[in-house]
Image (cartoon, grey):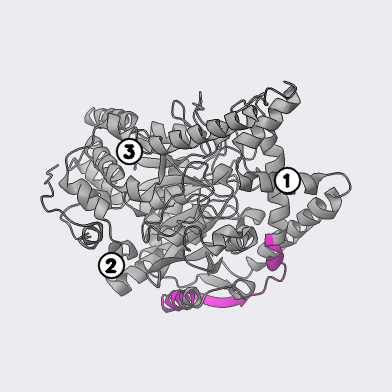
């Protein structure tokens, strides 16, 4: 790969403004499908492609902070293995050789997995999640583990125990959450693809905030084996990408039955790739689209509403039949979720007690050195404020005397919501809404500081998790220079139904503006990587580790101070 050194010294602002999306043949800006084509034709090797992504990561991470762990050395080795398989004439999967980033909520053998929590800092899993086994078997190099809100609990990626991730569109703003690391990495061209987990919108809401495609498959359609549990009845692994077709290619790869997951569906993976390709033709005649009446209530910002209405008009222009659907129980989904989810969090996170999993912190010397005090000290030091808040809420909801009043009532509301979705899908093929009522907000803003305001960000994405249905978020244009997202939901096991209109919307918006939305994103780090020399893998492996070490040192110092007192 030809490379040039940047010889002109620029200020940070000048450097940013100098970013040029039209730079010749920048391989990292291709879609994953385009990369796969170049790999198959021999125009580029997996090593060259992976090294190019590592160079971008090294240039971008001081600004973006998408990665907790960069596994550059391992990724290059995996790239070489993929190239060797191809050289031998082995029939390769569609995405073979295309690198990928993994949310640090999914276990990876031999690569540190923390769930962005101090309580799991230093844990090296002895096994791979099922989705990781499939990715490795397909010959896709793993670039590293991406940042998230601790144990996937948050909507901004500010609740990581180590550092917040920044939005590539405006690094003073959040990328959404909990999977802001994966979304930012893909939007910033640090990776062409990523995996995330979605419990209440943690793939889709960051997609809306960063201008990426985020997919929550049907519950059980992708194995959860190896996904660190948050709320087991709603957790789902899914793709993060820059195009709908890329997401479909990744979902077909990772989907399917897994005997290791008791909730895994025995059904074949829906034909999502074929649906995405069909949608690119922009012909939606015969597709019935329902606009959820309750999803356009108070709280939707004017720019988001305007973009949503314009996107609906595009659906109509492509032949879709659009009607309004009334779902009166839907507004109660937020209330039900914030009873059910903390209840499951309280149960799932009980295992992190210093005895079975995670770090062990002993109580101060002046306290009895008992198992109970050790557990208290460990959980106090290991969990962050948002995780503690949800554990307390869940423990209360499950306590004697309140179980039926809170948890039981929330489950009954969940059943009503499922019934309403089932009824709605009798008259329409897909349902649509804005993915998020607002665009990305400032890091440390009032939204971030108020838990109730933060929770409201998930109001449009939560219903799909409660009902177990598939949902996809696709970019629907900018609002004041920031991306917004369009959500499409389909019936259980019919993920293909949402891919067709999603790809059609993507194609129509690209045709309308003569370019995809990410073409307007300034990416000075890509230019820096393109003009510099290759970053050594051993150097890339240390990216962001100084910040993590500083957090750990601060925590150790705080514990020592308490013990001295």
Residue 519, how many percent across, how many down? Answer: 28, 63
Give the residue at x 55% y 50%: 198
For this view, does 502 lie left or right of residue 50? right
Along the line of sight, which residue is nearer the eye, 355 or 294? 355
Task: Tell me, yes or no, whether the two marked residues, 2 and 3, touch with CB atoms within 8 Å.
Answer: no
Gap between marks 3 and 1 measured at Cα: 45 Å
Q: Is residue 60 left or right of residue 556?
A: left
As drawn, the label of residue 392 is 1
**Nearer to me, 561 or 330:** 561
Whether residue 67 is in magenta: the answer is no
Mark toward the start of the polypeptide (1 vs 2): 1
Instruction: Name the element at disc 2.
Output: loop
Q: Residue 546, which numbered label?
A: none
Picture quadrant of residue 366: top right
Q: Report how far apart the C-alphas of labels 2 and 3 lie in the structure.
A: 27 Å
Question: Which residue is denoted by mark 2 in the rendering?
Answer: 515
**Percent coordinates x, y for residue 536 in the rendering:** 24, 32
- Residue drawn 16% across and 47% down? 531
Mark in the foreground, 2 or 3: 2
Disc 3 packing (10 Å; few <14; some 14–19; many ≥20) = many
On-image quarter of the C terminus:
top right
> 383 left or right of 184?
right
Foreground: disc 1 or disc 2: 1
Q: Earlier in the sequence, mark 3 or mark 1?
A: 3
In the image, the segment drawn in magenta is 307-334
Label 3 element class: loop
Quarter of the image with the N terminus is top left
Mark 3 highlights which residue?
A: 96
**Which quadrant of the view contains residue 211?**
bottom left
Q: Residue 533 sits in which quadrant?
A: top left
């Amino acid at each position: 790969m030809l490379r040039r050194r940047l010889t002109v010294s620029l200020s940070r602002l000048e450097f940013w403004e100098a970013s040029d999306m039209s730079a010749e043949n920048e391989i990292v800006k291709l879609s994953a499908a385009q990369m796969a084509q170049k790999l198959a034709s021999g125009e580029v090797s997996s090593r060259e492609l992976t090294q190019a992504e590592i160079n971008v990561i090294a240039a971008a991470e001081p600004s973006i902070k998408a990665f907790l762990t960069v596994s550059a050395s391992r990724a290059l080795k995996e790239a070489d293995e993929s190239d060797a398989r191809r050289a031998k004439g082995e029939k390769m999967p569609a995405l073979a050789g295309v690198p990928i980033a993994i949310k640090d909520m999914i276990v990876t053998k031999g690569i540190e997995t923390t769930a962005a929590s101090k309580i799991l800092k230093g844990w090296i899993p002895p096994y791979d999640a099922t989705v990781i086994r499939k990715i490795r078997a397909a010959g896709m190099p793993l670039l590293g583990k991406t940042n998230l809100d601790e144990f996937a609990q948050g909507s901004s990626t500010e609740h990581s125990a180590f550092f917040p991730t920044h939005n590539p569109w405006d690094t003073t703003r959040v990328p959404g959450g909990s999977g802001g690391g994966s979304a930012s990495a893909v939007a910033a061209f640090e990776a062409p693809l990523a995996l995330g987990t979605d419990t209440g919108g943690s793939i889709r809401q960051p997609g809306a905030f960063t201008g990426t495609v985020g997919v929550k498959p049907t519950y059980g359609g992708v194995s959860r084996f190896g996904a660190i549990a948050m709320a087991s009845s709603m957790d789902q692994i899914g793709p993060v990408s820059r195009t709908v077709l890329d997401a479909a290619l990744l979902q077909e790869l990772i989907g399917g039955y897994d005997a290791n997951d008791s909730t895994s569906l025995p059904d074949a993976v829906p034909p999502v790739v074929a649906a995405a390709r069909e949608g690119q033709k922009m012909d939606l005649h015969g597709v019935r689209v329902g606009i959820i009446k309750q999803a356009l209530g108070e709280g939707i910002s004017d720019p988001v509403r305007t973009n949503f209405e314009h996107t609906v008009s595009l659906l109509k222009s492509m032949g879709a039949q659009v009607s309004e659907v009334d779902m009166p129980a839907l507004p109660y989904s937020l209330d039900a979720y914030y009873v059910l989810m903390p209840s499951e969090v309280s149960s799932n996170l009980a295992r992190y007690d210093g005895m079975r999993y995670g770090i062990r912190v002993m109580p101060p010397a002046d306290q009895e050195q008992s198992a109970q005090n050790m557990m208290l000290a460990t959980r106090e030091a290991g969990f962050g404020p948002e995780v503690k808040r949800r554990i307390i809420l869940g423990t209360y909801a499950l306590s004697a005397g309140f179980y039926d009043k809170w948890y039981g009532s929330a489950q009954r509301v969940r059943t009503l919501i499922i019934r309403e979705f089932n009824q709605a899908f009798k008259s329409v093929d897909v349902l649509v809404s804005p993915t998020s009522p607002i665009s990305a907000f400032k890091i440390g803003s009032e939204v971030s500081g108020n838990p109730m305001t933060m929770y409201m960000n998930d109001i449009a994405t939560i219903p799909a998790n409660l009902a177990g249905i598939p949902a996809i978020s696709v970019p629907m244009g900018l609002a004041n220079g920031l991306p917004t997202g369009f959500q499409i939901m389909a019936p259980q096991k019919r993920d293909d139904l949402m891919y067709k209109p999603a790809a059609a919307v993507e194609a129509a918006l690209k045709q309308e503006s003569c370019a995809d939305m990410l073409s307007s994103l300034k990416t000075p780090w890509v230019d820096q990587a393109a003009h510099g020399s290759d970053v050594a893998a051993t150097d890339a492996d240390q990216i962001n580790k100084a910040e993590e070490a500083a957090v750990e040192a601060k925590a150790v110092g705080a514990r020592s101070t308490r013990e001295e007192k």
